[in-house]
Amino acid sequence: MHFGRRALFGLWITAMLLGGCQSASNTVDKQVSGNAEENNAQESVESVAGKETAEDKKDGPEEEAEPSSEDSVIAGEVIEEQSFSAVLEPAGQFAFIASQELSAEGFPTYHFYLKNEQGKLTELTYSIYDWELPGPADLKAVAFRDVNQDGKKDILVIIDRITGAGKMGAIPYSTVVTFTQQEAGFTYDAAIVEAIKEANIYRQITVDQVMALAESGFASNADQAWASLAPGVYELEGSNEWAGSVIEIKNRRADQISLNLDAFSVRGGEEGLKQGNVNLGELSGEAFRSEGDMVFKDESFELWLSLISPNELYVWDNGEPYFGAGVYVGGIYALKKD
């Protein structure tokens, strides 16, 4: 995250109070980390910031939180690259402002605000099912799209978080926050957030993937995700000359994929290599769908594959002996570029 240009922001706020917001984009998508996506509908983006005033952290919001009736105060520091001026039809023109507060451990809590043409600042409060679990996070994307398909522009936010929970606890997990446009203003939509969570099998999601779910009525994307998995060779993260693993994905369907796995481990470094202390691991066959994952089975051995993104897999096994000593195949696999 980058911060600064506060003086420019102060001038922007003054201009806004005197003359109102200038015209801006009807659709804005922006990502500052993770996998970048094209902003096809973006026409213009205007950086927005605000006077930074410290405020004690408040208790978590209600499940269906209504916009504040009183003027809000911006908490923490403004995230300029994720703050915009935008027309949110039919409600009108607003300044969308994102800010973050850091805990003593350095973990961020994100706040979102709308400022109308009259200068009224309203915080968009929200509650997420596991938001009480603090940890490293990154504000990945902000977009203004019709998420609930009612013809009105809504606010869509994607936050990548490291939860520390489960096998993939160290891999960033996308949390989606949506504020849908209602007569009373923009309201956190817990039902849509839950629908996205239930329908999506990717660990990391993009704005376009969220909108594909919305346009499908939030039907599961599992069939489409596995059927469209890129064929080719996926390499285990951290592979080197002493240990490594690759998986070749061949035929793939919604409920089945064909794969070959080749792995190796050298004991004793260069001297061990000269002495032939090399253990191998090989696997070839079909993996079949089990809920949102694929699983290869050979007697008591099981190898599981999950989708992190369209070009990344997470692989693990059930711990049964199958490969040579010291051969490990679990971890993140990324599609190798030609």
Image: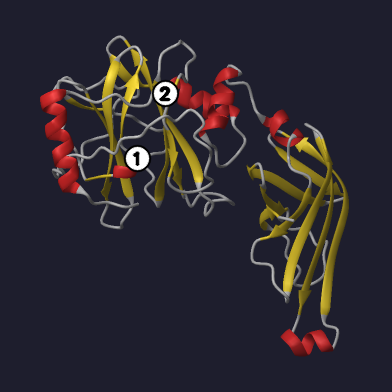
Indicate the position of residue 56 as horizontal and vertical percent values.
Answer: 16, 42
Q: CA distance from mark 2 to mark 1?
A: 22 Å
* Residue 170: mark: none
| Labels 2 and 1 touching (C-beta < 8 A) | no
Q: Earlier in the sequence, mark 2 or mark 1?
A: 1
Indicate the position of residue 148 as horizontal and vertical percent values.
Answer: 47, 16
Vertical relation: 240 (above or below) 137: below
Vertical relation: 63 (above or below) 264: above
Judging depth in this view, the residue of 105 and 232 nearest the camera is 232
Q: Which one is closest to the eye, mark 2 or mark 1?
A: 1
Q: Is residue 335 left or right of residue 104?
A: right
Identify the residue position indicated by label 1 in the image: 82
Residue at image point 25% right, 21% down: 67
Label 2: which secondary element: helix
Identify the residue position indicated by label 2 in the image: 190
Indicate the position of residue 132 as horizontal and vertical percent values.
Answer: 36, 41
Judging depth in this view, the residue of 10 and 231 nearest the camera is 10
Q: Residues within 10 Å of mark 2 (few under 14, many from 20)?
A: many
Residue at image point 60% right, 38% down: 202
Residue at image point 59% right, 25% down: 212
Residue at image point 13% right, 43% down: 53
Question: Three-letter amino acid code at disc 1?
Answer: Gln
